[in-house]
Image (cartoon, rainbow, N blue to C red):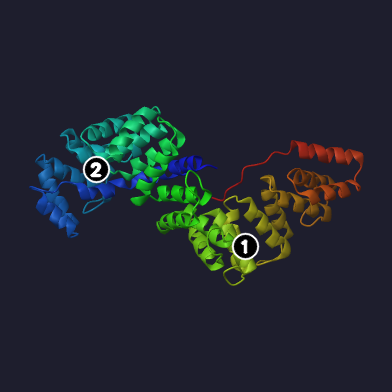
Amino acid sequence: MTFSAFGARLFLKRMVSILLGLSIFWVATVATAGPISDCTEARKKGDFAPSAECLRAEADQGGASAQCLLGVMYENGEGVIQDYAQAVKWYQKAAEQGETLSQNFLGLMYEKGKGVTQDYEQAVKWYQKAADQGSADAQSSLCHLYYVGEGVTQDYAQALKWCQKAADQRDARAQFVLGQMFANGHGVLQDSTQAVAWYQKAADQGVAIAQVVLGFMYQHGESVTQDYAQAVKWYKKAADQGDPFAQHTLGVMYDTGNGVAQDYEQAVEWFQKAADQGDAGAQLYLATAYGKGLGLTQDYVQAVKWLRKAADQGHPGAQYGLAFAYHNGLGLTQDYTQAVKWFQKAADQGDALAQNLLGFIYVEGHGVTQDYAQAHKWFNLAAARGKLDAAKSRDLVAQLMTPAQIAEAQKLARDWKPQKPELKD
């Protein structure tokens, strides 16, 4: 996977969560000079209720700054009951007076459907008004919406226009999107040097996704000279912000000694952080580490705990591992029925190891009725996925079958289709 495709995938996942947190950040920029200064002083001291009453008096008199800040307090539930509809009401009053921050906040409320019915047309309208007054935040929001085509027709020319304006004001989100545009040739000529430069600017401002992309680029030598020290540097910055992909990748690097000195304890530390956030791959690694005693004390009960967490998310490797634990009584009571259940789940997703073991289970009749046709089917499927010893097992079990039974088994294999995992609620 190239860094361009990698960054795009992460971008779409992360940008919504970034946007949702912005209004709290923007609060600090609300103008507080003039008649509302006493109100804001109370708020700074944590006296939210008196501050809200003070602001209400000013807002009722038509003060746009007071209306904006009162909207913020309703949105965040500071000194008043949290009420998005009231927040929208006050943002609207201030926005109609041309108050830039309120126009931006109102755009965000319409975009996210907070206190109003979600309406991208209204969101763009208010972002546009704020952006025209020079709001980098609103320019950045337009940049994002036009780039991904969310609620508007995708338009790279408009995205480039607004991204550039916001990036020129050092808006980190816009800098990252510009990196994406240059990396992928969206609306501009593809230029990896420009992509790296914009990613760097965003990463330097603490944008975790940009730090991850830079880490990936340095790790794999994508458009930069391969440099593991730089890769670790950027992954650590993102990991310290709680990015699970960066945490997982650091775990892999320390586990394999790829670019760093091999250190199982460090690997476990980073995998643990990612696993605690629900990363199924990290959970599987922890299970393996507990099972083998790598970087921690061997503990089959803990191994099973992490296998189950990953298996419940549909990870076929974890489902296979959990099935193996049930089959051999490792960390839990031996249970062939449960073993078959989990081998089946992994096999249904195309896991060759699970398919191969299911073949043996049907030969032996452990937890299932002995069935050579099913055994042949699973050996056949595993062999087709490169499990060479499965082909030998298939041919051996065929010696115990009639030609009609073999034909039936081959039809079962032909008709088999991989299934999506069933996720636990």
Q: In the depicted view, which residue is nearer to us: 321 or 226?
A: 226
Horizontal and vertical percent position of residue 99: 17, 38
Quarter where residue 335 is shown: bottom right
Kindly give the residue lying farthest to the front in the view shown: 225
Q: How many marks?
A: 2
Q: In this view, does 89 lie above or below 363?
A: above
Horizontal and vertical percent position of residue 388: 79, 49
State the SS at label 1.
Answer: helix
Residue at 70% across, 53% down: 343
Tag 2: amino acid: Ala
Quarter where residue 139 is shown: top left
State the SS at label 2.
Answer: helix
Residue at 28% across, 36% down: 165
| Dot placed on the residue nearer the N-terminal end, 1 or 2 | 2
Q: In this view, does 163 lie above or below 397?
A: above
Q: Name the residue under label 2.
A: 87
Tag 1: amino acid: Thr
Q: Which numbered dot is residue 288?
A: 1
Give the crowd class for mark 1: few <14, some 14-19, many >=20 residues within 10 Å.
many
Quarter of the image where the N terminus is located:
top right
Instruction: Report, in whole angstroms, how far the alpha carbon at label 1 lies from the one at label 2.
Output: 50 Å
Horizontal and vertical percent position of residue 102: 21, 39
Q: In the depicted view, which residue is nearer to us: 236 or 116?
A: 236
**Lateral position of residue 154 relative to residue 254, left or right:** left
Kindly give the residue lying farthest to the bottom in the view shown: 297
Horizontal and vertical percent position of residue 274: 49, 57
Does any portion of residue 38 appear in the rendered image? yes
Q: In the depicted view, which residue is nearer to us: 89 or 390?
A: 390
